[in-house]
Amino acid sequence: MIGRRTFIPTHQGRVTVVLFVLEMEWVLSTGQDKNFTWHCSESGTQLGLYRTTAWVSGLQFDVETRHAFVGDYSGQVTILKLELDSCSLVTTFKGHTGNVTALCWDPVQRVLFSGSSDHSIIMWDIGGRKGTAIELQGHNEKVQGLCYAPHSRQLISCSSDGGIVIWNMDVTRQETPEWLDSDSCQKCEQPFFWNFKQMWDSKKIGLRQHHCRKCGQAVCGKCSAKRSTIPLMGFEFEVRVCDSCHESITDEDRAPTATFHDSKHSIVYMHYEPTTGWLLTSGADKVVKLWDMTPVVS
């Protein structure tokens, strides 16, 4: 017979994420009321409550540091330090243009992965290089789930279009540069269309601004007509690069660092069990699939 425990009602809206921390005997939960709470799983006593700025859509916890990683619909990730009866804000960071849809924490490398509705994944190096953010671009739709295989240092991600990507994280990756601001092309110096003074002085029509994904410079379409993959920067698909950067990218630089697979259903949830190498996915088609990942995660 299954025993039942009753918890004090905490959320005024739908519960969005629940996490059980076995080592602490805590239950962490978040809701559409923007409340983040944690209870004692034995007594049901509420230990604390924190008010978030937006609905929480991702939640991870590190037992050693008692840090809770909270991802929300604004695209922000918040780190909280939990105590028995209180919590304190450690920091917040934002790199996604869409809402955070999934989080995955690697306690060994002290790296947090966040997936988003903007199709991207960001690797936040919290414990190593203090804030380094690496982008991973390999999905065409919203990222729905993230799992990490610590024994092989591979990240598994899935998206709503059924795509499953296996990322090799045992490589030295590079940060993507910040996009630079300029009133004219930083290659040919032609004015952009809002630079009225230079357009008038040179009697030339302004051009549309683009950015090279490798160097971050503001360039016109003519100076960035070429495309290339840059896997070590996370770009597994071809992206816009300026002419000089295109010449500097070698065939070795274009070697892929991820493999792509089609699950043939719209994934809404995934779970990876590293001891067996099995991946469980459930889809919007009401189908549950069990995958043997040992051929690709090893």
Image (spheres, helix red, strand yellow):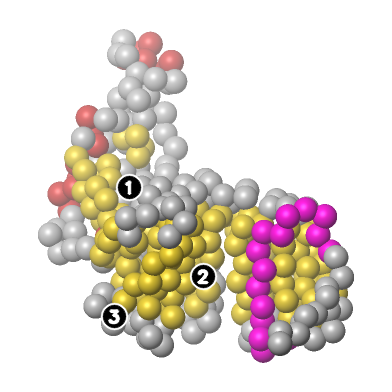
Mark 2 is surrounded, within 10 Å at the Cα level, by few (under 14), some (14 to 19) or many (20 or more) other residues, namely many
Q: Amino acid at mark 2?
A: Cys
> Residue at the location (78% across, 68% down)?
37
Q: Is-magenta flag for residue 15?
A: yes
> Residue at the location (27% across, 61% down)?
260
Residue 79 location (% of width, % of height): 66, 67
Please state if 6 lies on the left or on the right of 124 as rendered: right
Q: Which residue is mark 2?
A: 104
Q: Which residue is mark 1?
A: 213
The CA distance from mark 2 to mark 3 is 20 Å
Q: Is-magenta flag for residue 230?
A: no
Corner quadrant of residue 233: bottom left
> Residue at the location (67% across, 78% down)?
20
Q: Which of the two labelled residues, at mark 3 and mark 1, occupies the earlier sequence position? A: 1
Q: Amino acid at mark 3?
A: Thr
Compared with 91, 265 (above or below) is above
Considering depth in this image, is 282 or 174 the residue closer to the camera?
A: 282
Q: Residue furthest front?
A: 1
